[in-house]
Image (spheres, coloured by chain):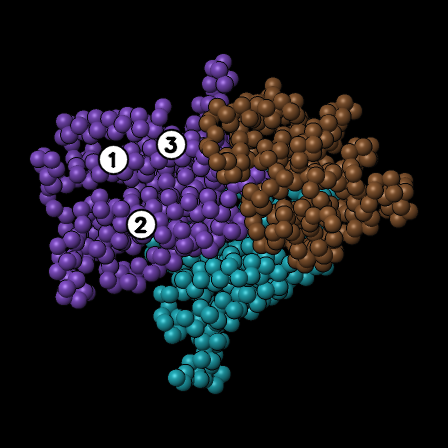
Chain colours: A cyan, B purple, C brown
Amino acid sequence: MSIPIDLLANAVVAGLLLGGFYAAVTVGISISFGMLDVVNIAHPAFIILGSYIAYIVNIHLGVDPILVALIALPVFYLLGAAVYQVYYVAFERRGQEALRGLAFFFGLLFITEVALILTFGVDYRYVEAPYIGPTWRLGFVDFPLRMLVPCVVSVLLVIVLQLLLTRTFIGRAIMAVAQDQLALQLMAANPVRIKRIAFAVSIATAGLAGAFLIIIGPVEPSVGREYIGRVFAICVLGGMGSLPGTVIAAMLLGIVESFTATFYGPSWAPAVAFGFLLLTLAVRPAGILGR
Amino acid sequence: MRSWSFFLLALAVGLSFFVLCMVVRNDYLFFAGYVVLQFIVLATAWNILGGYCGYVNFGSAAFFALGAYTAIALHKLGASPDRYLPAALADLARLVLPPPIPVLMLLGGIISGVVGLGMGYLTLRLRGVFFAIATLAMAVVLQTLMINWDFVGGSRGAYVIRPASVSILGFSLGYIEYLFLVMLMLAVAVLTVARLIERSRLGYGFATIRDDELAAEAAGVPTLRLKLVATTISGAFMGMAGAPLPYYLGYVEPGAAFGLQYAVNSIAMPMIGGTTTWAGPLIGAILLGSLQQIATVTISSAVNLLIVGVLLVAFVIIAPAGIVGLVQGWRRRWGAPA
Amino acid sequence: MSPAPLLEVKGVGKRFGGFVALEGIDLDVHEGERLGLIGPNGSGKSTLVNCVCGTLQNETGSVRFAGQRLDGLPAHRRTHLGLARSFQLPRPFRSLPVADNLRIPLLYTVRRRALLARSERELDERCMELLRMVGLEAKARRSPADLTQVEMRKLELARAMAAEPKLLIADEAMAGLSHSEIEDIIALLVRLNQQGVTIIMIEHIMRAVMSFSQRLAVLVSGRKIADGKPEEVVNNPEVVRAYLGQ
């Protein structure tokens, strides 16, 4: 069976572009779950929130969605800090994070989705920007700008985060807290504060990822749930706390999903992520670059 | 109280309630009551894995919907067997299908139980969080599968014609009353089973898994096997609860079967009622279920789901042991013997 | 020619990422023996116990118990075979009363071996008997949260004993105990040993280890550096340098 080369090339490119975006979506989980061991399954809810905020400002004020998200970064940061504080006081401190923490985040996920349905209804919403629509052609390969721009910004985001984590004091403290809380305490740093900062950063990235999401395609409240499987699959496959691993795993998933969509139809995409997750958990729970 | 006595007592209470509803003759009671009973089953089934073992299942809707879709599949098969089966089997199918509701329940339960077992086998060796995430992802995947499967109607949904009445033991029952009765029996069964498990060796094993799995293993508890048992039983009962849904609604499409209310309620009801005992999910289901039935007609159904979500988060933070826990706390503080 | 050892640990190694917790551990324990295992904190004693008992899987080497290879066997199967351990940091079942914590090994380990099923009352009595042995009978119906650290360690030990093991590993069961309590626990363990239970005692309290052990093994930085008669081991210069001499 010969697959036409242009179909193949386009599937690969689409996958890579998608993968870049997935990396931005997942990097927050790599921090909150991979490093802090906080099972924030409400992460997609914050993403969708970011999408809708970008939507509102874009529709009413015509501001570019990515710009909106960047301006809204502090808001998401504070939101993340607040959520972590509640989580810490209510669960982590009591040592009951397993069941109740999960239920807490699920509740948040659920409340966000229903609140959005009540406010905006279930219709698909989309934003407008000059790069949504045009496509670059390089030979027989298409680079839709609505995918290229988010992908590029996503990769930039991950690079910036990796630099923050490895070059700044706070960043290194975050990585330290992921490894050994006691040692960090002995170094007179407050682990709770460090974790709160890390979690807040993870939610801030979610807000940004939300803007990317609504640029790539229209959004409605239940879209978040599709991303849970993807996000955790990528996080696990990428080795939990490793940012470079996350990018690689995200690209991999993007390509596999793209191929599935091209040759079997787009409605099967959510199943791919789940299959990935199961496969990863069964075969190599430590991930590709795992520790 | 021995389990047999409990079963008979629960049966008696349930049947009295049924007779009361028949006397009042308000069809709405049966429609609403069916939903509450369904949630009693879902909440109790969820709690067997979630409350007793500490493994959170976010995909209750998937197991529930599997039961519903098993029923739809068999119904479609029975309606036009010649299209799907070779001649010899088609004749058999015409005789046997669609089976009566109790049989459908059993079959739905078997399918859901097997799926639960399979998924558990793949994910239960790892930490509880991975099981929880896998259940969440599984719900999405299963919904995707059902949307793409035209045999059961795909995204267009499937219609099921329900008969006007059913005759049992010489009595003629309206169909909704029949469905109510069947769900009542299922509720009594699941409560008895939950209570039986709680007090048995199995219940002790479950509790150790919840408390400290490592120590449980060291003490000789076969944790993986017990977790698989819990997942299978839990999934099976959820599937049984879902099997009559097509007949209750008359029309089923994936959005309804995999609806948000099943996912959140099967977690909220046990966590609000109390997860350590069979009474918790029962209380949670009756309270929340009735509240929602009232709210749906007075406010909107989306608002009432929002309320459930908020209550879940509030209880999880403030009263983690649920209503049962609160009552136990009051009793202890006001001098009742511990 | 003496019979094969009850426990044969050969070349066992375990890493956590880049950190080598255990390397090339060889250890034999004969039936009826009282072995003491000592070493500085972080030397790998508990890791060794975890590998032997199945809580962790060792990457290299093998563990044999009563002639049977334990590789890949889950922890509960090893307990059924007759291996029991107490945890260095107590891990009680918090939602069960103290007495029921002991019921678990009775239900899941002992009952499997018994030819006749024991009645509920016999189980209750056995739980109380075990609690009496460690001096906890007064707190039988209390929650483990109401126990002091010391009492929780006793509960740990009692829970391991409840599994009626052939080999019992007591991991720092005496930390924090008073002088007389230590004597009591040693007497208890000696009595168990006389009944045929092989015991490995992991301790920092040298007095206890010396009076209890027939043989002493020393672990330092994941390696075994000494193994022999207690008096000889204690005077071994390398042992003194690494652990004893301060």
Q: What residue type is labelled 1?
A: Leu
Which mark is first along the chain, 2 or 1? 2
Q: For the residues marked 3 and 2, what is the alpha-carbon distance in whole angstroms?
A: 21 Å
Q: For the residues marked 1 and 2, what is the alpha-carbon distance in whole angstroms?
A: 19 Å
Task: Examine the image and state in which quarter residue C46 appears.
Answer: top right
Disc 2 designates what residue? B110
Q: Position of residue B52 (x, y in %)?
A: 45, 37
- Label 3 and label 1 in one chain: yes
Asked if B49 appears above or below A231 in the picture, the reply is above
* Residue drawn at point x = 73 percent, y = 47 percent: C2
Q: Mark 3 and 2 residues: CB-CB less than 8 Å, in contact?
A: no
Front in this rendered view, residue A204 or B238: B238
Q: Where is residue B85 in the image (x, y as percent from the top left)?
A: 18, 65
* Residue drawn at point x = 14 percent, y = 41 percent: B175
Task: Report the disc number at residue B184.
Answer: 1
Q: Element at badge 3? A: helix
* Quarter of the figure with the N terminus of chain B: top left
Q: Can residue A106 be seen in this view?
A: no
Which mark is first along the chain, 1 or 3? 1
Front in this rendered view, residue A112 or C112: C112
* Residue drawn at point x = 61 percent, y = 48 percent: C54
Q: Where is residue A22 in the image (x, y as percent from the top left)?
A: 51, 63
Q: Residues within 10 Å of mark 3 (few under 14, many from 20)?
A: many
Asked if A29 appears above or below B296 in the picture, the reply is below
Residue C234 left/right relative to B146: right
Q: Where is residue B180 in the image (x, y as percent from the top left)?
A: 21, 37
Q: Element at badge 1? A: helix
Disc 3 designates what residue? B195
